[in-house]
Amino acid sequence: MKGPPSAARQGLATCHGCGLLARAGHGHAIRCPRCGTPLHGRKPESIARTWAFILAAAILYIPANLLPIMETSSLFGSQKDTIMSGVVYLWRSGSWHLALVVFIASILVPMAKLLALVVLVVSVQLRSRWQPVQRTQLYRLVELVGRWSMLDVYVVTLLVALVQLDALATIRPGAGALAFGAVVVLTMFAAMSFDPRLIWDSMEKDDA
Amino acid sequence: MAMAEQPLIACHECDLLQREPHLPQGGVARCRRCGATLFHSHPQSTERALACTLGALLLFLVANVFPIVSLKLSGDVVQATLLGAAQVMYRDDMRLVAGLVLATTFAAPLAQMLAMTYLLLPACFRRRPPHAELVFRTMTLVQPWGMVEVFVLGILVSLVKLAHLAIVVPGIALWSFAGVMMLMAATAAAFDPRDLWTRLGPPR
């Protein structure tokens, strides 16, 4: 049985700017006739770029969780907070629902996102035919959910700006905040470089 | 470009080539292989998106002028605006983080709203503004980096964390940011690039 036609097989490419279906060419000179975005049948060097961003994010994930994201100094001494200790604090102070939100956004999501991207890239590299619809949905979820990890960066920024009560308490940002922001940005780049159409390409090549 | 009576469309997620379905108003077309949303048709999508963008732009102005939260402690009042908070981070030798916060909560949303207005306002009168292609391309590039909705959640978490320390007074900007968040979501839901390009007409 012959597989369903993909646009790339017919020499067509969808513009990822405006969605126009246009005749694809070779090389980088071809641009969408409607909005001018460079046209590619597939995102260029998708696998290599995604791996690079995944690795960089995974390395920075370690200091992001180990280094303090902020430092509180008050009359009772100073205290360094990592992301996890912030979650624990919220949990102990009775706001377990917020603790859950922060835990999901800051710890679970970045880790799950990295794992999901590894699964997607490896499955494409192995030309896996396993559950393409579910894998496409997984990709959609990764793209949707990744941005919420910025939560802790915003919380630190607001706390640092507000708690400047010289004698009583002062909060300063820690190096962990920088590493954490970098993880979020790098995983977003990783998700953007991955091309979900590669999942479906391996389905078709076997049919042909 | 010779097209059949019902034009072809390729799914942007799995690249399946298929005929465009006829859509009733307000309907959504999905890819028949992977289920991705291909396009939707809203009546007057361009006018709706423009109205929501203008509303969001106005609230965004308010959100950046007034304080987000004030902290009251033994007679002292500390206030924070978005730009002020980024400034404090910058002074505390966290320039990259300050830049990241500014880019995602200020620059990207503002650029997106301005670009939307630039394209949608003339489109309502079936005019094509100069450099429409460039503005559209920049807008799609910038869009994933606007994170107003995450920032609003960040404000709420900060409020809870501060509540034990002092009296926390939510400011006007908190409500304004929440409004910006909802109006930008409404813009994204109404916006239909297909309708936009039809209305902008062929390039000059």
Image (cartoon, coloured by chain):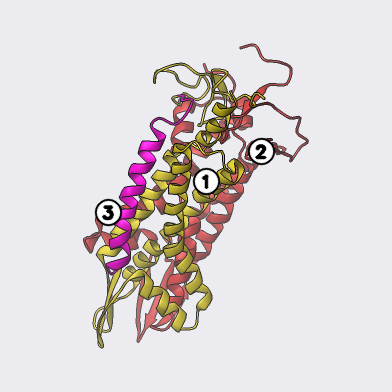
Residue type, mark 2 in image: Ser
Residue labelled with disc 3: B96
Please name the predominant secondary structure of the magenta segment in the image.
Answer: helix
Label 3 or label 1, whichever lies nearer to me, is 1
Instruction: Compare residues B15 and B53 and report the one nearer the observer.
Output: B15
Identify which residue is drawn at 70% across, 27% down: B20
Identify which residue is drawn at 33% across, 43% down: A52
Quarter of the picture containing the N terminus of chain A is top right
Q: Position of residue A10 (x, y in %)?
A: 57, 18
- On screen, residue B194 versus residue B77, left or right, reads right
Q: Secondary structure at mark 2?
A: helix
Quarter of the picture containing the C terminus of chain A is top right
Query: Spatial distance from mark 3 to mark 1, Cα to Cα?
Result: 29 Å
Which chain letter matches label 1? Answer: A
Instruction: Compare residues A150 and B108 and report the one nearer the observer.
Output: A150
Query: Spatial distance from mark 1 to mark 2, Cα to Cα?
Result: 28 Å
Identify which residue is drawn at 39% across, 18% down: A27
Q: Position of residue B61 (x, y in %)?
A: 46, 53
B168 w.r.t. A192: above or below = below
Instruction: Compare residues A138 and A140 and report the one nearer the observer.
Output: A138
Query: Spatial distance from mark 3 to mark 2, Cα to Cα?
Result: 38 Å
Residue labelled with disc 2: B45
Magenta part of the protein: which range? Answer: A39-68
Q: Position of residue B55 (x, y in %)?
A: 57, 50
Residue type, mark 3 in image: Leu
User: Answer yes or no: do the residues labelled 1 and 2 have beta carbons within 8 Å?
Assistant: no
Q: Residue furthest top?
A: B2
Q: Secondary structure at mark 1?
A: helix
